[in-house]
Image (cartoon, rainbow, N blue to C red):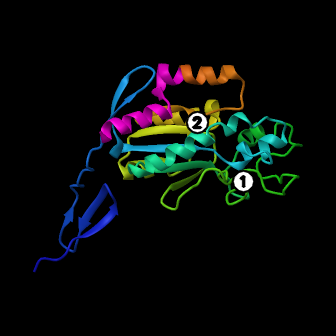
Amino acid sequence: MNLPLRKLGISPNAWTVNQAIADITRPPLEPHPVTLMTETKQLRMDLAKTAILVIDMQNDFCHPDGWLSHIGVDVTPARQPIQPLQKLLPILRGVNVPVIWVNWGNRPDLRNLSAATLHVYNPTGAGVGVGDRLPKNNAPVLIKNSWAAAIVDELEAKPEDIYVDKYRMSGFWDTPLDSILRNLGRTTLLFAGVNADQCVMTTLQDANFLGYDCILIKDCTATTSPEYCLQATFYNVNQCFGFMTNSDEIYRSLQTKST
C-alpha cells in the first residue's frame, strides 16, 4: 500500500515524508527574473529569491514623541522613508517578495545586553536609555511589545509579514534572521530603514559576509546622523558590500517584466 507523503518544513526548504520515505529533493521555486538598474551595474535578479528588510522604522526613532526626539535629535530625516515605503511595500507583497521587519525589541530585563551596548544609548548612565521610561508617555525605550518599539503607524504591517526582534545594531547578531532567510530560499536582500549608517549598514555588512546579495534602496533609507555619515555609507555599499538603487527603478523593473 502506498502511504501518503506529508510536507515537513517551510517551502522551499521542505521535505515530504511518511513512515517509509523521506523525499529531500526540495522542488525549486518558479523563477521570477527582472532586470534592475543600480548606480554601478545592471542587475539580473530573481524576485523568487528576494526579500526586503525594513529596519528600525519604530516610534523611538521616527516619532516626535519617541526616544531620539526626547534626547534632542531631529527625527525629520528618519521619517523620510515612510512615504516611499508606503508605496513600495504593497507592490513587493504583490509579487510575493517577503517583507521582513527587523526591529529593536529587547527583553524587559535586558539580560542579553552588555554594558558596552547600553553605554551607546546612555553614555552618562543618568539619562533615559534602553529599558528606561520616556517621561512623556511612560513607554520603555526599545522594549518588545511597547509603544516605543512599535512600527510607526504610517507603515502598515501585515499579518503575512515576518517580524524579527534584534538586540544589537546588526539584525543578524543573536537573532533567527539568517535561518528564516535560508528556509525561505531568499538570497537577494533589499534594504530599507534607519539609521543608514548604523543599524541598516551593520545588518547589510553582515548579510554580505554571510553570502547574501545586498541592494540598498536609497530613497527608502535615511539617517539622523550628519550628512557625511550618509555619504560614507553610500560609498561603502557601492565599493564593498553590494549595490544601490531607488524605488522608482524597482517599479520600472516590475513594469518592464509585466509588459
**Left or right of 196 in this view: 259:** left
Query: For the residues carrying marks 1 and 2, which lies nearer the camera in this image?
Result: 2
Q: Is residue 177 placed above or below 248 in the rendered structure?
A: below
Q: Residue at x 27, y 61 (%)?
A: 15
**Left or right of 90 in this view: 104:** right
* Quarter holding residue 38: top left
How many numbered marks does the figure carry?
Answer: 2
Locate residue 8, reporting x and y percent. Answer: 31, 66
Decide: few, some or many residues near mark 2? Use Cα within 10 Å; few <14, some 14-19, many ≥20: many
Mark 1 = which residue?
110
Q: Which mark is residue 200?
A: 2
Q: Residue at x 50, y 47 (%)?
A: 89
Q: Determine whether the residue tagged by mark 2 lies in a helix, strand or loop.
A: helix
Residue 256: tell me if it is visible.
yes
Q: Earlier in the sequence, mark 1 or mark 2?
A: 1
| Residue type at the position of mark 1 | Leu
- Magenta region: 236-259
Front residue of this view, candidates 69 and 90? 90
Decide: few, some or many residues near mark 1? Use Cα within 10 Å; few <14, some 14-19, many ≥20: few
- The residue most toward the front is 259
